[in-house]
Image (cartoon, rainbow, N blue to C red):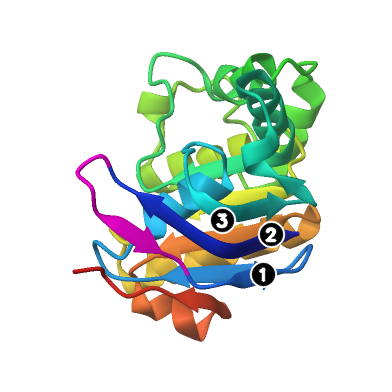
Amino acid sequence: MIRVSQTSYQYPGGTRIAFPDFHIPRGNHGLLLGNSGSGKTTLIHLIGGLLRGQQGKVEVGGVDMASLTEQGLDQYRGRHFGFVFQKNHLIQALTVEQNLLAAPFFAGLPQNSENAEALLQELGLEGKRQARIRELSHGQAQRVAIARALINKPTVILADEPTSALDDKNCDKVIRLLMEASTNHGATLVVATHDQRLKSVMPVSVELVASG
């Protein structure tokens, strides 16, 4: 599903970082592990098409991400990727349902309230559809962010540092929820993190070393 080969990226300041070759089969889980400065966030942004300009090849679903036009990239990303970040980037003034339905709206896909409700039930958020984000606990907001990542039925879920600010109990809960949700929806899950605790839960696809 994901294949990175002979890939490097040069930052605006001139520093270049080279990434190891690796691939993650469709429906599998993969961990991109590395300390600060190792390029893990850069790599996950390259995979998700949030960043361009690399040398080498990044393929997702057999598509070379560099071959897509800006419009094509936006469409491909909206239809094939779900994103989960350390900060959930939910819109506080909107309801849970409105936050979920914003994802298909921006991807040019039909908005379906029944799909939103089914995801909320799956993630233990039944009854929270009309709640405002500011009314939720931190854990509930995290689950809304996961639901938002799943609502477009992506083939790939990319998670950037989803557990780094969590204690052991909540770290385990969040990563297992991500893995279970990805498996249930047939999506390939890729987690970029410096959190060594995840090595005992997920297979390491590549371990990055800080440059310089």
Indicate which disc, 1 or 3, sits on the residue closer to the N terminus.
1
Percent position of residue 137, x then y:
38, 41
Taking the spot 51% from the left edge, 47% from the top edge, the residue there is 46
Left or right: 175, with 61 as reference point: left
Q: Earlier in the sequence, mark 1 or mark 2?
A: 2
Tell me which amino acid carries mark 3: Gly
Q: Which residue is mark 3?
A: 56
Residue 49 showing in the rendered view: yes
Q: Residues within 10 Å of mark 1 (few under 14, many from 20)?
A: some
The quadrant of the rendering that contains the N terminus is: bottom right
Kind of element beneath mark 2:
strand
Q: Main secondary structure of the magenta part?
A: loop
Q: Earlier in the sequence, mark 3 or mark 2?
A: 2
Given residues 71 and 149, the one toward you in this image is 71
x 69%, y 52%: residue: 59
* Front residue of this view, candidates 6 and 150: 6
Binning the other alpha carbons within 10 Å of mark 3 as few (below 14), some (14 to 19) or many (20 upward) gives some
Q: Which residue lies under the disc numbered 1?
A: 23
Q: Secondary structure at mark 1?
A: strand
Residue highlighted by disc 2:
2
Q: Does the magenta portion include 204?
A: no
